[in-house]
Every structure is written in structure tokens, then in C-alpha cells.
Image (cartoon, coloured by chain):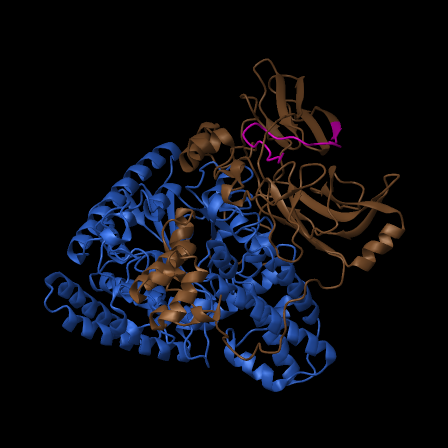
Chain colours: A blue, B brown
């Protein structure tokens, strides 16, 4: 009999980036890198666990934009080309490094790594959603939905229809792709505000996650803090994030991923290699880019980029095993303590970005694999669970109003509302008002119906929290600005043409072809509730 | 970005490289060889693009999340011809509106759009000073006059956005933009929708209600439970009514709540009432020199018209005041009687007396007290009502010292 539960939650998300008709858009590589470094290694890990008879339990959100991209034939083809290029480059690396023992060993490591990716890709016919779905069907994965385009809900709370459309469109999309209704949701950026629980219940959801203070600041104050979910008055459960386990993985200073033997993220062959050699793998205009082959380890947390030693996956894997033991030990002590204080089994909920594992922390998937295996075989203080299983087995919880909060820096809305990105909200809100207005209409013909649906897609795409996030972090800002403007302008054009009663069919077709997310969207989700 | 930079540095001629080096203010560039130039420019670029390095002052989590998007520096190029003749986003939409967005427990962001003809019209009607009015409308059907509190923040005619300090967290606010006339009349240009500001402190309300909801139950359209808000809840210094124990779990006190709160949030959570450093919400990097000060010194704005570059407070100094009210209800009856306050059973002292201390927020508090004798038949009751309003509040605690520029 165990004393409590550990629930790992992986939030898999990328904004909708798809530019058919353009030869090269660097931002599409967000998806390709995440496939090779995160999604494929996770699938391989799940397969290995099942093969070894381990009935693992993980909660994982897969956002509608990510699911749409993973199922998109155009992007699937482009990923194959991308992978082919990597394989070609690796073959050249094997030759180039043949007189350098360590580098050649690393080149062989990448050869195996990319070959594995290729095999996994083929095994599922390039449809990784199918791969994840099978683990949900077997009860191992609990796949959550998200806002339709990861829109930041607290900053659209004045427009309940806009929030509803984010939820409803996502739930419908989930049904189309996973063959059942979603039970749980990852609120975009864990952004919660009072009142949202009503809509979550009405769209059929049963639970969501908040940051720790979403529960700790709840009213009345929850008896068990962040270590038991609370029921909102609509009956939807809210789970709180555990700070301690978060810190151990997220933190660059004190967290595991900063260990000197792990692979250095910032030193990529695309920038390190001699120019003429790497040029075929650079951007078409000749500018270097990351290729995903990295030969160095972090070496020292203070050291400069020049003084990095070569990476060794053997020792990195050993370290991942050691770190998983440490993580397990800490959870055991934590859960023993909590059980003593609470007098009932606590649940420790540890949410992370899925892309943290593999992409940022290259050894992350090994760490997870060791953690799940060790937890299964080597201890009985806690059991790993996913949120659906937990609620099924623990249907009695305290009723509280969770507090408005997010998991962003400083805990509220500032990361998405500051001097770098506040300019988007007057436009986003105006488009939202106009969309709500448009939704009152019934189309007179097929063209109008398509225009109304496309208008809804454009509003949703403009609302992605990623654009405001990128404007704040300062990476790829021009792209985020361009995407925000572009969807708003496309929306405005449709709005104007609806009012003038003349729709440019040719232009509409082009927009439909480019922004083809949510083929089954219903613009009527913007009608008053 | 100059056209030059759309092309790879490494393919540039010496002459082109020199031009770029000049832009980046590389010293003695004219004497450098091609490879020296290349190195110097890349170094200068790296310094101007700190985001490609770890030095960026992001929180650890944001930094990690951001690496999803780091694949290299992208040239700004036209992605598609779909947008070719769509023009630009408008500077305004030609109708008066104002929107308030919560940023954190202490600050809200307000933006507005008021066409100049509307302003002129209202000025002609006697409006002199443009201002924002912030109303606390918690649990109200707001009609413009019945706010729990109102604060007026004079603002500049050129401003389009403002950071507004929030007097009390975890409450609902509406903001007006309008003109005050010479005789003090308020002429509204636009009124916002109401939003709730997140809480600054953990709740004092303890009320452990446990319910069972089977996992397969459909929740659509249902309200599973109605929580009765706490006049019967506030509790400091051991005066709290014992929390209800409906599930036979027994032995409830405050210790579990406190222990787990501190465990989950760290000691600073309980001390400062602020888990995430929200008492220093304005990072130093925002404290630019070009912020302008309002006459009152409380709201801040950016003079730039449509840029969206708003600037929270500049250099700061602090002062503080806390003041609040609590309500004490006391009485006595037979020691074996059942006494309820607002329908909630309370415990009597062995001599039959009771005494409870409650939070006393703005608004009307209703206290129906009923005693039922041990025989279950004899009843006595008293109902008391208390009204509190707070017409003025400009306060803050010591830990959340307001940022006032000077």
C-alpha cells in the first residue's frame, strides 16, 4: 500500500506554423526539432515501457495546433526532407571526423539517433498523433486538450464568447482526433480566472491544472494546500502544481538540466562548422542556423561558450539515472511527510513543458524513463498516476473557488501584458467584438459560410499566447509581430467584405489553404452563451 | 533591419562587410581583413542579440520554454502575398471605448480609444480635466454611482494607455474615462467591462466542505455546490468558528492548512502574502528614464501615441498605511443550546457564551442568529445588519510599498 501519488504532466505545444508556398520559413523548424528531439523519444520511451510490462501513467496535453501540425501532410513531407538532410549531414560528419576518436563517436551517436527517429516515423506512417493515441487507448496516457490556439484566457475574460470558442473548438477538435471527448484540459499558461469553471463544465471537462497559488490562494483556503485537488462549485476539479519538483527540473541554476556532463544546448554544429562545409544545411540565403547536432557538454555553469569540452552520451546517461534516483528519493520523503501531515494520500503534481525533455534537456527522456522504471520496481512509497485515474479513485474532495493565476513569471498575467506586447490587445479585442457581431449572422450561401468560418480561424490564430510570449522573451520577435498582424489583417479584410457584401473568393481560398487549422470549425461558437 | 543583413555575412564582399561594420560601430574596421571583420561584426551582433545567450534576464522557466523557439536568427522576409494589399492595422477604431485588464494583484493595465470629436463634444459641455475613474464594483449591479470606492486619476490628453494601481486585490473593478467639469461633475466618455483582480493574500476563510463527485458524472449546466461566503469565516487569533466537519474526518484545526500552505509555497508565502515577489512587480529593466508622471503621481503613462510602449513607474520611494475593520459578535445562552449564525452552527464556551470576530469588508453584512434550546422547541433569534463603505482608500502595506516616482 503506497502513501501517496506522483503525477507527471507533460504539456506538448507549439503554435500553428505552416507556410506552404514559401520555400523556407525558419520557424517551421520549431516543429521539426521538437519531433526529433522530444516527441519521437517520448514515443520510443512509452513503447519500451509497454514492452517491458510496465503499466506507466503519464498525463500529457497535446494542443490543437500541435495535433493539427503533426497530422498535416504538407508538414509531414517537409519533416521527412528535414530528416533526410540531417541524415546526409551526419553521413558527412562520419567521414569528416574519422580521424578524431571522440567526435567520430559522437557522429555515430547522432547517426543512431536520427535512424531511430526515421524508424519511428515510418512505423506510424508519419502520423505521431496515432502513436500517442494508442497509449491513451491502453490507459497509460491521459491526454488533455487545451485552448484551441493556446489563447491566454484571463486577458479575454471580458468576452465570454471568445473564451467559449477557444474551449469548444478545442474540445471538438479533440473528439475528431482522439475519438472521444476530452476529460481534462491544460489551460493555456495555466491561466485561470474565476468564472471559467462554469464554461469548463459546460464543454464537458472534468479537471484542469493551476499553479500552486491557484490553490493556495483559493477561497476558502484548501485544507490540503496544493496536495489534493479541489472541486470548483461547477464540479470541475483543479489540481495544483508542486513547487519543489518543479524547481528541480526547471531551474537552470539548481535544476538537473544544468549539470556539467549534460549536452550544451547553445553550441550547435550549424554555427560551429566551417562555413562552406555547412552552407548546404544553412538557410537558403546563407545564414547559419541550428542543425541539432551538438558536440559539447555544459562543462561549467559559468564558463564561456569557447571553453566547452566534448559531450559523452555514456556519462550523460549515467547522470540521468543518478538524477532520477535523486528525484525519486525526494518524492518519497516529500510524500511521507505530506501523508503524515494530511492524514490521507497526497498527490504531487509535477507539470513541465514536454519540449523541455529532449529539446532543451537532451537527456530528459532518459531521465523520465529511469524515473518511471525505478518508481515501478524500486520503491513503494508512492504510485505514479495520471489525473483521470486519480479522480476516478478519489472522488471526494474539498469545494473551493480557485484563485486567478498563471504559471508565468511572477504568477499572474504580466508576461503576456507588458510594454513589449500590450499593443496587441486593442486589436485583438476589437477583432473579438467584431467576430461576436459576425456570429449573429446566418450565411446566405456557401461562400459566406466559408468566410465566417475563416474569420473565426483568424481570430483564434491571432490569439495564440505564443506571440505575446515571444515578444516578451525577445527571440524571433519579427515573426511573432508578423503573425499577429497578419491574422488580424486577414480577419479585418473578411469583416469588411462581409459588411460590403462582396467576398474576394480567390483571396479567401488562398487564406483557407494557408490557415487550414480546424477544418470542422463552427463560427457559431462565438454566439452569446 | 537593413537590406544587407538579409544576406549572409559570410558571402559579403569586403566593401559590404565594411558597411555593416560601420553600422555596428566596429572600431578601426577599415584596417581589418575580411575574416577579422566577420568576427568583429558577429561579436557586435551577439551583443545586440542577448536572447541567443543565457544572459537574458528571464525567469528560469521562461528561458527554458523559450528554447523551443530558438533555431537561429531569421531574416525578416515576406512570408506570403496573401497579405500584400491588406495595409496596416489602424491606430484607432473610431469609437470610444476603454478596457481594463488585470496584470497582477497590484496593477491593472488600461487602454482606451476616444476619437477627438467625442472629446471636443464633451469639453464643449464643460469638461476640463481628462481623468480615469476606477470603481470597486465587487458583487454590485454597478450603475455609475454605487461603487464601493472610487479613485480618480487625472491623465494626459495624449495618453492612450495607463497602469493603474489597484487599491484592494481580489475585487472587481470598472474604469471610466471622462472629463471632470469645473464644478466637479463627471462626464463619461467610455466605461469598461468589469474584471476581477487576482488576490494578493491567501484567504482567511476556513470552511472545509468535502463533496463526492463520481468521475463519470456529467457536469454540464450543473452547479454542484454553493459556497456561502464568509461573514462567518474570518479568523485570526484563535477566534475562528470551528470549521464545519461534515465528513466525519474530525479534529480540524488551522494547523493543517497553515502547515501545507507554508510547505507548498515556502516561508515567504505566509510572511509576505506574496508567493511570487509580486511586491516588486516592476522589474528594474522597465524603469526607463522617459516615463512621465501624472499630476497625482499614481498612474503612469507613456507619451508615445500608438507605439504600445507604456512604462510603469520610475524611481520609487515608499510609504504605507494599513487600516481595516473587523466585527465582533458576542452573546450568551444556555450552554446546551444550539446556536447558529447565518445557518452555520457555532460552538459555545462551557458557560454558554460565544464571541466571534469577523472580517468586515465593504457592503451589507447580515447576521441572523438563532438559538434553539436543548428540547428542540424553544427558539430565540436576533438579526443584525451592518453596513460598511469605504469612500476613500489609498493605502498599501509595508511589504507592498507602492512605487511612486519622484
| Image coords of residue B273 (percent x, y) | 52, 33
- Residue in view at x 37 percent, y 60 percent: B29
- Horizontally, residue B395 falls left or right of residue A5, namely right
| Residue range highlighted in magenta | B384-406
Point out the residue furthest to the front here: B31
Judged left or right of residue A123, residue B400 is right
Q: Residue furthest bottom?
A: A506
Q: Is residue B267 magenta?
A: no
- Residue B100, image x and y in percent? 66, 50
Residue A114 in view in this figure: yes
Front residue of A98/B239: it is A98
Q: Indicate the quadrant where residue B296 lies.
A: top right
Main SS, magenta region, reads loop
Residue lying at 27% horizontally and 77% vertically, measured from the top left:
A84
Q: Residue at x 45, y 32 (%)?
A: B268
Judge left or right: residue B241 versus residue A177: right
Question: A307 or B162, which lies in front?
Answer: A307
Specify whether residue B388 is painted magenta: yes
Q: Is residue A377 visible?
A: no
Give the answer, above or below, for where A10 lies relative to B344.
below
Amino acid at each position: 500500500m503506497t502513501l501517496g501519488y506522483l503525477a507527471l504532466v507533460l504539456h506538448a505545444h507549439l503554435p500553428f506554423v505552416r507556410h506552404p508556398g514559401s520555400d523556407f520559413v525558419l520557424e517551421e523548424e520549431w516543429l521539426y526539432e521538437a519531433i526529433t528531439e522530444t516527441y519521437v523519444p517520448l514515443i520510443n520511451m512509452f513503447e519500451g515501457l509497454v514492452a517491458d510490462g510496465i503499466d506507466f501513467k503519464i498525463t500529457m496535453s497535446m494542443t490543437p495546433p500541435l495535433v493539427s501540425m503533426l497530422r498535416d501532410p504538407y508538414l509531414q513531407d517537409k519533416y521527412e526532407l528535414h530528416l533526410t538532410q540531417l541524415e546526409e549531414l551526419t553521413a558527412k560528419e562520419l567521414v569528416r571526423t574519422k580521424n578524431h576518436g571522440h567526435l567520430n563517436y559522437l557522429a555515430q551517436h547522432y547517426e543512431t539517433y536520427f535512424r531511430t527517429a526515421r524508424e519511428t516515423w515510418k512505423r506510424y506512417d508519419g502520423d505521431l498523433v496515432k502513436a500517442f493515441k494508442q497509449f491513451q487507448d491502453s490507459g497509460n496516457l491521459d491526454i488533455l486538450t487545451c485552448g484551441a490556439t493556446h489563447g491566454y484566457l484571463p486577458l479575454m475574460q471580458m468576452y465570454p464568447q471568445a473564451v467559449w470558442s477557444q474551449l469548444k473548438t478545442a474540445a471538438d477538435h479533440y473528439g475528431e482526433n482522439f475519438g472521444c471527448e476530452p476529460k481534462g484540459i491544460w489551460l493555456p499558461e495555466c491561466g485561470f480566472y474565476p468564472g471559467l469553471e462554469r464554461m469548463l463544465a459546460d464543454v464537458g471537462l472534468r479537471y484542469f491544472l493551476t499553479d500552486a497559488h491557484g490553490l493556495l490562494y483559493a477561497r476558502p483556503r484548501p485544507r490540503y494546500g496544493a496536495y489534493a485537488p479541489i472541486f470548483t462549485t461547477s464540479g470541475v476539479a483543479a489540481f495544483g502544481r508542486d513547487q519543489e519538483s518543479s524547481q528541480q527540473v526547471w531551474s537552470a541554476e539548481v535544476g538537473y538540466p544544468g549539470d556539467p556532463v549534460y549536452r550544451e544546448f547553445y553550441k550547435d554544429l550549424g554555427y560551429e562548422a566551417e562555413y562552406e562545409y555547412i552552407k548546404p544545411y544553412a538557410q537558403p540565403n546563407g545564414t547559419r542556423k541550428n542543425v541539432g547536432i551538438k558536440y559539447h557538454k555544459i562543462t561549467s555553469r559559468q564558463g564561456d561558450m569557447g571553453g566547452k569540452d566534448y559531450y559523452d552520451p555514456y556519462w550523460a546517461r549515467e547522470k540521468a539515472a543518478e538524477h532520477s534516483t535523486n528525484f525519486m528519493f525526494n518524492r518519497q520523503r516529500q510524500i511521507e511527510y505530506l501523508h503524515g501531515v494530511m492524514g490521507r494520500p497526497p498527490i504531487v503534481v509535477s507539470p513541465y513543458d514536454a519540449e523541455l525533455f529532449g529539446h532543451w534537456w537532451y537527456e530528459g527522456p532518459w531521465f523520465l524513463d529511469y524515473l518511471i522504471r525505478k518508481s515501478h520496481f524500486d520503491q513503494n512509497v508512492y504510485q505514479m498516476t495520471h489525473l483521470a485515474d486519480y479522480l476516478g479513485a478519489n472522488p471526494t474532495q474539498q469545494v473551493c473557488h480557485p484563485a486567478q493565476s498563471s504559471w508565468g513569471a511572477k504568477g499572474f498575467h504580466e508576461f503576456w501584458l507588458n510594454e513589449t506586447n500590450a499593443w496587441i490587445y486593442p486589436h485583438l479585442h476589437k477583432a473579438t467584438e467584431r467576430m461576436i457581431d459576425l456570429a449573429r449572422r446566418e450565411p446566405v450561401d456557401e461562400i459566406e459560410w466559408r468566410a465566417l468560418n475563416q474569420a473565426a480561424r483568424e481570430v483564434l490564430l491571432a490569439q495564440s499566447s505564443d506571440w505575446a510570449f515571444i515578444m516578451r522573451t525577445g527571440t524571433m520577435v519579427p515573426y511573432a509581430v508578423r503573425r499577429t498582424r497578419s491574422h488580424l489583417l486577414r480577419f479585418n479584410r473578411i469583416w469588411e467584405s462581409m459588411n460590403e457584401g462582396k467576398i474576394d473568393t480567390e483571396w479567401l481560398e488562398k487564406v483557407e489553404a494557408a490557415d487550414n487549422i480546424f477544418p470542422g470549425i463552427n463560427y457559431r461558437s462565438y454566439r452569446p452563451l | 533591419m537593413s537590406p544587407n543583413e538579409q544576406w549572409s555575412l559570410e558571402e559579403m564582399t569586403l566593401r559590404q562587410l565594411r558597411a555593416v561594420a560601420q553600422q555596428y560601430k566596429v572600431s578601426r574596421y577599415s584596417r581589418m581583413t575580411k575574416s577579422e571583420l566577420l568576427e568583429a561584426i558577429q561579436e557586435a551582433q551577439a551583443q545586440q542579440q542577448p536572447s541567443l545567450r543565457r544572459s537574458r534576464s528571464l525567469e528560469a522557466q521562461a528561458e527554458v520554454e523559450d528554447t523551443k523557439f530558438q533555431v537561429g536568427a531569421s531574416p525578416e522576409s515576406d512570408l506570403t502575398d496573401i497579405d500584400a494589399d491588406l495595409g496596416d492595422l489602424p491606430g484607432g477604431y473610431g469609437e470610444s471605448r476603454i478596457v481594463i485588464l488585470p496584470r497582477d494583484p497590484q496593477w491593472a493595465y488600461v487602454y482606451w480609444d476616444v476619437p477627438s470629436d467625442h472629446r471636443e463634444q464633451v469639453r464643449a459641455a464643460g469638461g476640463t480635466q481628462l481623468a480615469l475613474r476606477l470603481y470597486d464594483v465587487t458583487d454590485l449591479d454597478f450603475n455609475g454611482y454605487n461603487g464601493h470606492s472610487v479613485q480618480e486619476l487625472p491623465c494626459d490628453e495624449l495618453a492612450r494607455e495607463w497602469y493603474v494601481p489597484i487599491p484592494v486585490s481580489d475585487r472587481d473593478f470598472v474604469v471610466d474615462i471622462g472629463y471632470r467639469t469645473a464644478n466637479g461633475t463627471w462626464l463619461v466618455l467610455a466605461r469598461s467591462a468589469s474584471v476581477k483582480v487576482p488576490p494578493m493574500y491567501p484567504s482567511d476563510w476556513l470552511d472545509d466542505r468535502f463533496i463526492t463527485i463520481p468521475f463519470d458524472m456529467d457536469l454540464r449546466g450543473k452547479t454542484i455546490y454553493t459556497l456561502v461566503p464568509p461573514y462567518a469565516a474570518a479568523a485570526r487569533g484563535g477566534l475562528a468558528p470551528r470549521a464545519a466537519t461534515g465528513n466525519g474526518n474530525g479534529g480540524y484545526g488551522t494547523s493543517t492548512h497553515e502547515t501545507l500552505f507554508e510547505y507548498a509555497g515556502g516561508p515567504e508565502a505566509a510572511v509576505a502574502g506574496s508567493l511570487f515577489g509580486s511586491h516588486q512587480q516592476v522589474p528594474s529593466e522597465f524603469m526607463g528614464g522617459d516615463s512621465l508622471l501624472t499630476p497625482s503621481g499614481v498612474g503612469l503613462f507613456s507619451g508615445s501615441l500608438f507605439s504600445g510602449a507604456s512604462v510603469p513607474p520610475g524611481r520609487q520611494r515608499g510609504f504605507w498605511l494599513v487600516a481595516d475593520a473587523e466585527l465582533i459578535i458576542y452573546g450568551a445562552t444556555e450552554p446546551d443550546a444550539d446556536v447558529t449564525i447565518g445557518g452555520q452552527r457555532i460552538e459555545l464556551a462551557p458557560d454558554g457564551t460565544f464571541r466571534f470576530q469577523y472580517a468586515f469588508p465593504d457592503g451589507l453584512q447580515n447576521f441572523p442568529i438563532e438559538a434553539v434550546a436543548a428540547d428542540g422547541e424553544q427558539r430565540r433569534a436576533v438579526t443584525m445588519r451592518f453596513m460598511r463603505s469605504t469612500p476613500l482608500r489609498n493605502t498599501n502595506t509595508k511589504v507592498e510599498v507602492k512605487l511612486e516616482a519622484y
